Image (cartoon, rainbow, N blue to C red):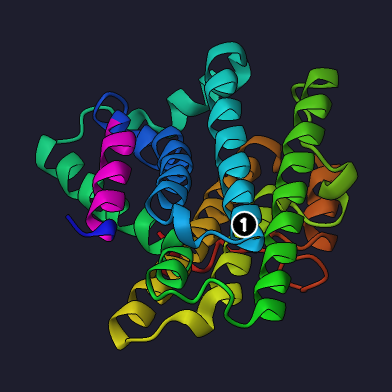
Amino acid sequence: MSGWMILVGLAGALSAAGFKKFVWFISIGYAFAISGMSLAIAVLFAERLTVPVVVMLSILFAYSMRLGIFILLRERKNAAYKKVLAEVTADIKKVPFFVSLAVWIVVSLLYFAQISPIYFRLSNNLADHHPWLFSCGIAVSLLGFSIETAADYQKSKAKKINPKRFCDTGLFAIVRCPNYFGEMLVWTGVFAGSVTTLLTPLQKAVAIAGYVGIIFVMFNGARRLEQRQDAQYGNDSAYVSYVKKTPILIPFVPLYSLKRWKFLG
């Protein structure tokens, strides 16, 4: 069996949690699919591993495991989040099986596509190719992991102090969705750091699809969050002022709203 088939199958097995709760296809299932594939790549290409590749795989494993555990604990212990999750997913509780099946197949392929630059780097026997570019990719991914981790911690801390107020402290004073921005950086590092190791049109298409796909998901998530926060805090003058002066997704880029970007869904 080809290595990519093993990885897609593993992603499918680990994201199958979505059949129990639909949202888990793109939350818990996503996180643990990335963790599993990171380990599987290390096993499949053990003889080709280099220190930089191990570092990148370790970042992906740590990033995804932290995310998965964070989501699990939040769903179990955070009453406010449970309420929000119930409201957000109220219309998708009874998803037809064939829809769940289609989503499962798509996300399994997407998760492989996201991590495919590392897979292709090793399957093409180019582990040492363009080391400076790869090192820059590792640095970007590590920065993204750090930002996402810090943002989740800061928001959890702020919500414990005042559960009914929006978070505008720490990284949230710079950008309204720093956790989403951090995740985009993680995958930007993965893609950009290994883009020169993609040798065929198919490899390039798969890697580009994975990168564009996760960026789309992050913009979609930011738009949905904006809609929920507008509904919850729209009458709060402090929130209105915060929204007007703080970029929604990318720091220092004057993009303050995604509500009109209906193509995001």
Q: Position of residue 52 (x, y in %)?
A: 66, 62
Q: Residue at x 77, y 32 (%)?
A: 153
Q: Position of residue 24 (x, y in %)?
A: 38, 33
Q: Residue at x 68, y 58 (%)?
A: 181
Q: Position of residue 162 (x, y in %)?
A: 82, 22
Is residue 235 visible to us here? Answer: no
Query: Quick check: is 62 in the magenta stretch?
Result: no
Q: Quadrant of residue 120?
A: bottom left
* Amino acid type, residue under disc 1 in the picture: Met
Answer above or below: position of 218 versus 43. below
Is residue 15 visible to us here? Answer: yes
Q: Is residue 158 left or right of residue 49?
A: right
Q: Which residues are magenta?
A: 4-16
Query: Quick check: is 11 in the magenta stretch?
Result: yes
Within 10 angstroms of label 1, few (less than 14), some, or many (20 or more) residues? many
Q: Secondary structure at mark 1?
A: helix
Image quarter where the C terminus lies is: bottom left
Q: Is residue 98 left or right of residue 79?
A: left
Residue at label 1? 56
